[in-house]
Image (cartoon, grey):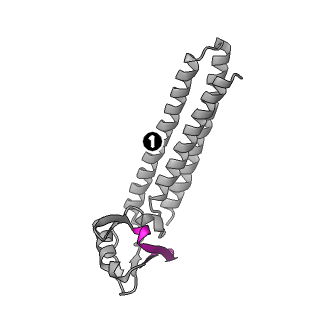
Amino acid sequence: MNEELQFIIDSALENMSSAIEHLESELLKIRAGKANPVMLSSVMVDYYGSPTPLSQVANVSTPDARTLSIQPWEKALLAEIEKAIMNANLGFNPMNNGESIIINVPPLTEERRKELAKMAKAETETAKVSIRNARKDANNEIKKSEVSDDEQKNCEIDVQKHTDAYIKKTDEVYVRKEKEILTV
């Protein structure tokens, strides 16, 4: 295969891979009933006047499957962290014990589980659109290339095979996450 065509396929594969990676990182943010420090990744704490991610001012850990523990590096930040968690509107009720902040993660209701599964499905569809866009871009580049029609057709077939494989991967990732969400 010609170098130009190989480069086009490689860049399409790179875009498809990054769509899968993005999907996995977005699905990590959707909670599945178990406590996970990633749940607090969107919390911004007012650290001496500038908004700072919680992970940069405190240690977030999970002592057990239903509890998040936040240990600030400066005791003076306890109230600010507590306020930031409340303002983030995550549905958590932080408890300040003077040393650290404890959050009990409530079990998910059936309705909330279905809602989260829908969110995961939407993220999966977004990833599929990205993969299909990578295919479209690659096919457009192939058509612009100055190679024989047979080489173009073979290259488009290769791109389609890769697209199908990546779409299948997104479905597998979604099924795994859906199972995790819906398991009580």
Is most of the magenta stretch helix, strand or loop?
strand
Residue drawn at x 36%, y 65% is: 52
Say if residue 33 shows up in the picture.
no
Residue 43 on image: x %, y %: 36, 65
Estimate how packed mark 1 is, as few (under 14), some (14 to 19) or many (20 or more) residues with alpha carbons within 10 Å: some
Residue 106 on image: x %, y %: 40, 72
Residue drawn at x 49%, y 74% is: 61
Q: Which residues are magenta?
A: 54-72
Up-down relation of residue 118 to residue 165 (above or below):
below
**Is residue 55 covered in magenta?**
yes
Up-down relation of residue 176 to residue 69 (above or below):
above
Residue drawn at x 59%, y 17% is: 145
Q: Is residue 80 left or right of residue 125?
A: left
Residue drawn at x 64%, y 24% is: 5
Up-down relation of residue 83 to residue 95 (above or below):
above
* Of 82 and 52, the residue lying toward us: 52
Q: Is residue 58 left or right of residue 176?
A: left
Image quadrant where residue 18 sits: top right
Residue 16 on image: x %, y %: 56, 39
Q: Is residue 17 left or right of residue 56?
A: right
* Of 162 and 75, the residue lying toward us: 75
* Of 85 and 4, the residue lying toward us: 4
Query: In this figure, which residue is indicated by the disc labeled 1?
Result: 126
**Is residue 101 covered in magenta?**
no
Up-down relation of residue 148 to residue 5 (above or below):
above
Q: Residue furthest right?
A: 1
Q: Residue furthest front?
A: 48
Residue 40 on image: x %, y %: 41, 66
